Amino acid sequence: MKKFTLIIILLLLSLPVLSQEFIHDNNFDEKIKGNAFDDNNGKIIIVEFWADFNKENAFQDWDKLKEVTYYRCDLAHNPKLKAKYRVRMAPTILIFSEGDAYIKFKAKAGLDLLCPVDLPKMERAIEVVKRESQY
């Protein structure tokens, strides 16, 4: 019975990680820009450049954001994206609309590498991107 309880607890703790889709060098353009048959107009996509060593400082409120698609990109396994977007620190968060990056939040240099944005600031940034991408 103890083993069963432990397995259930471990599964419950891992659910937030399992629900977050990772994006990679080889599928980034498809996910961000879509394809010829995809209706990507006005769609807000958020990509968090992430590192396992700093997972405690990842953005924690993705489930509270509305009308956005969220991906994580593991810096250790995606050198092309890391170079293309000049990501030096984890976490770094980019907000995209219609395939273009609009806003970049990056961790400050230092030893703490804290998440550079909280929920209210992220929600305001999403609203700015929605307004700017309408024109």
Image (cartoon, rainbow, N blue to C red):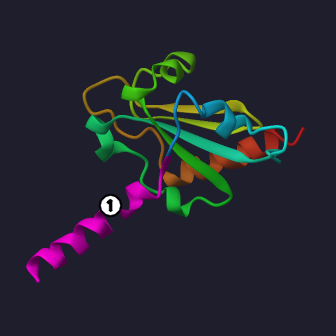
* Local crowd size for mark 1, using a 10 Å CA cut-off: few (<14), some (14–19), many (≥20): few
| Left or right: 19 as drawn, with respect to 7 | right
Residue 130 in the image: state x and y as whole percent: 77, 46
Tell me, yes or no, whether the highlighted magenta stretch contains residue 18.
Answer: yes
Residue carrying label 1 = 14
Tell me, yes or no, whether the highlighted magenta stretch contains residue 55.
Answer: no
Range covered by the magenta-colored residues: 1-21
Displayed quadrant of residue 37 = top right
Secondary structure beneath label 1: helix
Amino acid type, label 1? Ser
Which residue occupies the foreground of this view, 56 or 74? Answer: 74
Q: Residue at x 67, y 47 (%)?
A: 126
Which residue occupies the foreground of this view, 129 or 68? Answer: 68
Q: Residue at x 52, y 33 (%)?
A: 24
| Left or right: 64 as drawn, with respect to 95 | left
Q: Residue at x 75, y 48 (%)?
A: 43
Residue 114 in the image: state x and y as whole percent: 35, 38
Which residue occupies the foreground of this view, 122 or 99? Answer: 99
Q: Residue at x 79, y 45 (%)?
A: 40
Residue 93 in the image: state x and y as whole percent: 52, 36
Displayed quadrant of residue 6 = bottom left
| Residue with the most extreme bottom position | 1
Q: Is residue 63 above or below residue 6?
A: above
Q: Is residue 37 above or below residue 112?
A: below
Residue 133 in the image: state x and y as whole percent: 81, 39
Q: Quadrant of the N terminus?
A: bottom left
